[in-house]
Amino acid sequence: MVKKTVLFVIIIVIAYTVVSITTGSPIERVQFRSNVTDYLHKIYTMNWKIDSVDYDFKNDKFIANVISDSGISFLVEEDYYRQMMDNYASSVWRDELKTAVAQKVKQVTGSDAEVIINVSHMGRDALTYHDEVPRYSKVSQKLSSEASIYIKGNFSATHYLQEMLEIKQWIVEKKYDASLTFKSEKEKIYFAIPAEDLKKIKSVEDLNPYRLQNN
């Protein structure tokens, strides 16, 4: 009986160790979820729910996937100093830009496009916004070096330069400063424009230096 009990304990310990290594400690996972709950209550007044808690094996830490009442998905994790931080602000900006850019591209080209937005802004300074995240145009100059707009669309075979120029000009007018990439659906057309060069482009000829070869 004693041997069976000892064997059972050993099996439980081994199982717990394996689970902890591959998916994180179950006890630490529960504690992390509790810490995230406390953090979100402290920082935000909006309604939200923790959709899941995932384990980052490479960095040995947990990451919470959270959804706001407006449908914005964002992440909460700990920094190197074990302080909570989130990317709610950059998630709001990504959603804002993706919706606006996709609508503009469809207006110009007449068809839907694949639009990918990246705004790398996750840290303590982002928390000053709390629920009142400003529009991207208000912070774009500060974040343009960390932001990118990727557009893969059904551009005209003959008038693609005019279409891209119109979209580029609109992005400048909206103050959506970010590096800008254009690709055709068949990837035969490929342009990459750094954020700092957007305002320099005034004509279709000005786009040519930013054309890249697709291998």
Image (cartoon, rainbow, N blue to C red):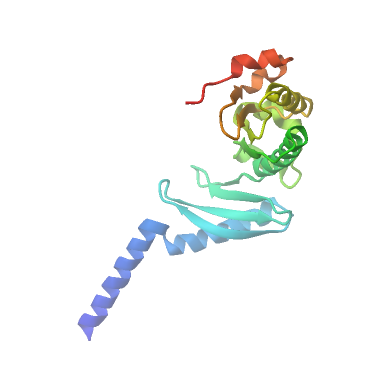
Q: Nearer the viewer, residue 130 or 97?
A: 97
Q: Position of residue 107 (x, y in %)?
A: 78, 36
Q: Is residue 201 visible?
A: no
Residue lying at the far left of the rendered structure: 3
Give the quarter of the figure containing the N terminus. Answer: bottom left
Count the numbered circles shown: 0
Residue lying at the far front of the rendered structure: 158
Q: Nearer the viewer, residue 197 or 39?
A: 197
Give the residue at x 62% y 28%.
Answer: 182
Give the residue at x 42% y 49%.
Answer: 60
Q: Position of residue 32 (x, y in %)?
A: 52, 58
Q: Position of residue 99 (x, y in %)?
A: 73, 42
Instruction: Tell me if residue 45 comes above or below residue 104 in the rendering.
Output: below
Q: Nearer the viewer, residue 186 or 24?
A: 186
Answer with the quarter of the image where residue 50 lies. Answer: bottom right
Answer left or right for 53 relative to 108. Answer: left
Answer left or right for 80 relative to 122. Answer: left
Q: Is residue 71 visible?
A: yes
Give the residue at x 62% y 55%.
Answer: 66
Instruction: Tell me if residue 179 comes above or below residue 125 in the rendering.
Output: above
Answer left or right for 92 relative to 194. Answer: right
Answer with the quarter of the image where residue 171 lies. Answer: top right
Answer left or right for 94 relative to 52. Answer: right
Instruction: Tell me if residue 6 comes above or below residue 210 in the rendering.
Output: below
Q: Position of residue 57 (x, y in %)?
A: 41, 50
Give the residue at x 69% y 20%.
Answer: 198
Answer with the quarter of the image where residue 41 lies. Answer: bottom right
